[in-house]
Amino acid sequence: MTTRKYKELVEQRTRQTLQKWSEQPDVEEKEIYRFLHNLKGTAGTVGIHLVEEYAGSTLLYFSDESYKNWTEAEWGDYLYPLLGLFDEQLMNGAIPVPGLQAAMLSDGKKQYEILLIDDDVELVAFLRESLEKQSYFVSIALSAERGLKIFYETKPDMILLDILLPDQSGIDVLKQIIGKAKKERIPIIIVSGEHSKDVQMYAYSLGVMDYIPKPVDIDLFLVLIKNRFELKLEWQKSIIVDELTGAFNRKYFNQTMKQLISDFRRTERTFSLALMDLDYFKHVNDSYGHLVGDEVLQTFSELVLKSIRVEDTFCRYGGEEFALFMPNTDAASAMLVIERIQQQFSLKEFWAKNERFNVSFSAGITEVTESHLNADKLIDEADQALYASKHAGRNQTTLYDEHLPAGKLESVLNVIIVDDDPLIRRIVTHQFQAWEPESIAKVKVSSYSNGPQFLQSDWYAPEEKFIILLDGIMPELDGLEVLERIRGSYPEVNILVIMLTGRNDQRDIIHALQMGADDYVIKPFHLPELLIRIERLAHRFLF
């Protein structure tokens, strides 16, 4: 659907609404407010900025809590000028809605993710806006508990941490994460109104990279952040070993794959690739804590490293997924090696919270052939075999063959839009139906026009994952009330919520985050921004 088509739909709906109201004796003020509120968000989203600006400024004259009745003579002075703005916008040319591919940075560089742990409402919003203008992605935590959760689930590229937090000291948070942050090369910067020399010295002694006093000089702050990421990039270029597990990292994986394929072309020396993924590892982290999860990863790696040959290469592929290259080894022989490791690891006992537990892993194996000399193809084959093992019951190994189902069958993501604006629902649904994010096999999209309709529907399934786009202002049931019911009735682990809000009051935004929203986007929003946020959130809990 083209941008012009969206513009025409907005204009058509506006004309229909004003025509309908002109035939009524009067219109309630709160109804006018909702009309302008929705028009401001929709017009801005599709690029009709003259209409967006006029609707936003006119909105100030109305209240969503007033029951006053307005006659056409009264409301017409405010609303009829909108119709002329559509023609003017058309003459000037509407700004196109960027396509899905625009969600990536234009220069192809990595978009760094920053975790901001601070309960200073105005500063949080200001820093996020300033950083995201520089193409960083910012996750917000208003408490230590939330910050720790996001840190362990997402592994951000940098952490900005306040000393004074509502539930525990930032120093206590620092002590809990500094060891892992150092191993993962994650810079931590303290941003605090606590200026005492003793506190700063103590923070530096624990391992923070910088200590920035409040109030923040935003120009110096942004230059510092850029400088630290450039330094981080140099670190990453020089590192090939994952310090937590002792396995080689993804960079070395890529180098090894390239070398072995080149060697096969030259000498026809075969090799096998095994991908291994720990079963129900998220359950381990959720039940026993991330430190115990790290212990499991380290124990697994130690076992594999003791069980393989000198010429084999063991890599941490990502999270709890590992890869093993076995030169001069066909797939059948490789399977014997993996199954032996599988048996030994499943017998390892771990102890946490006064109980013993075991962990297993699933694996998939493929072998290089003359017809399959593409690195992505080999990884995809091993991946398909791995997920066949998962679906067959886990704790087993599968050899790739062409009859295996393609794709990661578990990676189904439900995207639900709850918004009383039908055009917003239509635009967002249309875009997400064409969305094909990396590593997600299927996206299911549905929409609801109000909170009660959504809550009363049969939308939830315990085995599936959901990202809900929830409008903040809706009739019958406010978005915050819907959020409260979601968080009170369903497990948080399966559901992520993004608030779509036209409210500029930062207190409302912070309130939503405190109630359990995972992120927010202010209307009018740009679809690429929304897609970036959803893809990041999806990977936070799907993989």
Image (spheres, rainbow, N blue to C red):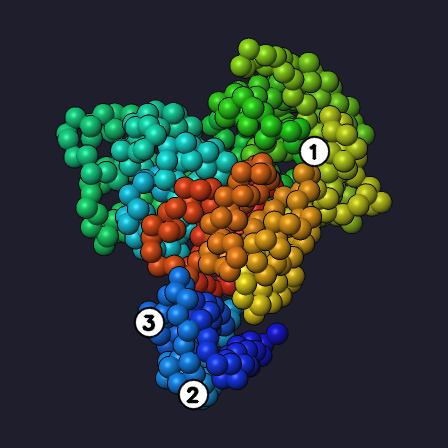
Frontmost residue, 377 versus 11: 11
Q: Are marks 1 and 2 in contact (CB under 8 Å)?
A: no
Residue placed under numbered mark 3 in the picture:
61
Give the structural element (helix, strand or loop) at label 3: helix
Residue labelled with disc 2: 84
* Residue shown at 72% from the left, 47% from the top: 407
Q: How far apart are marks 2 and 3 (CA)?
A: 20 Å
Dividing the image into 4 quarters, which one contains the C terminus? top right
- Is residue 345 positioned above or below 276 on the image? above
Disc 1 crowd, CA 10 A, few/some/many (<14, 14-19, 20+)? many
Task: Compare residues 487 and 533 and report the one nearer the observer.
Answer: 487
Which numbered circle lies on residue 274?
1
Amino acid type at image mark 3? Tyr
State how far apart marks 1 and 2 are (Cα). Answer: 64 Å
Q: Please identify, in this view, whether the residue under mark 1 or under mark 3 is nearer the observer.
A: 3
Label 2: which secondary element:
helix
Residue 536 shows up from this direction: no
What x and y, as percent, mark residue 97?
51, 71
